Amino acid sequence: GRGESRAGQAGRVEEERGRKRRHTHGGKEGERSARRRRRRAWIDQRWGPRLFLLLATSFLIALLILIFSARSSSSSPANNRGGSSSAGERMETECNGSVGVCELPYSHVVHAMAHNAMSSSADGFALPNHLQNMKSALESGVHGLMLDLVLDSGGRAKLCHGDCALGSTELARGLRIIKDFLDSNPREVVTVVWELAGGDPSGVLKLELAQVVQDLVLEGVMYQHSLGSVWPSLGEMIESGRRLVFFTPTRQGKYAWDNFAS
């Protein structure tokens, strides 16, 4: 009986130890679960609103992109004309690269001008005003050229910025560039504002200019404005073929293409 009593005591002790182990293990598991719940609650509290805001912002941006893309497609020139127009057909209705200026008078249009347009590093000028030459400027969308006409040391009229020793372009070459551009771009109007060195009191520079204009047969594309009259629209100038406008600072000479600008 005593042996059985000892065995029963040992069993109870072992059972108690097992219960304590289970209690301890369960407590640790409970602690871990509680920590996980607290961590998840902290993350939700700290990052939940930010994540929602990020997702909402991304959705809104995507929606705006879709809206603007749809508007751009619907307002494109091709769609407005039933989608059948080609780039060439659009060019036939443009004036100086824009449809919107065709009906505006010449005097109401802003013309992009290149000051001292002949002075460029591309043409070898020292201390140049530009990197691109006149040809590149016209092809890039510049529709106005300010040119200085000077007599060089040999008495020849050239395009120079002050001293021709710093760089020069032959007058005929400069006007040929303009003529070639007009020939290749029938919907463009080009303006040239001339500065004649020293005011050209003898009229020599203007005479030289008139001679080169005649040699290149430019009179047919040049426009002369009558003082006091209303300027034609760009579209009207293009339709008439008079797409080259010269402004000179002197009234000397009687030339059909000359427009005086003080």
Image: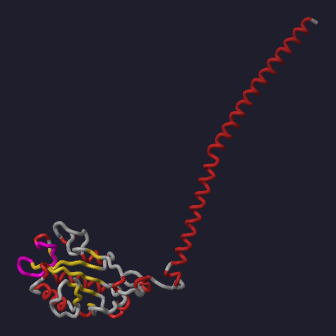
Residue 151 visible (yes or no): yes
Q: Position of residue 188 (x, y in %)?
A: 33, 84
Q: Which residues are magenta?
A: 152-164
Q: Quadrant of the C terminus?
A: bottom left
Q: Position of residue 72 (x, y in %)?
A: 52, 74
In this rendered view, identify the residue nearer to me: 39 or 147: 147
Residue 221 visible (yes or no): no
- Left or right: where 205 falls relative to 11: left
Q: Quadrant of the N terminus?
A: top right
Would you say the magenta stretch is mainly helix, strand or loop? loop
Hey, which residue is sitting farthest right in the picture?
Answer: 1
Q: Position of residue 192 (x, y in %)?
A: 25, 82
Q: Give the vertical position of 239 relative to 77 (above or below).
A: below
Image quarter for residue 125? Answer: bottom left
Residue located 15% across and 91% down the image: 253
- Left or right: where 37 falls relative to 136: right
Q: Is residue 153 magenta?
A: yes
In this rendered view, identify the residue nearer to me: 213 or 256: 256
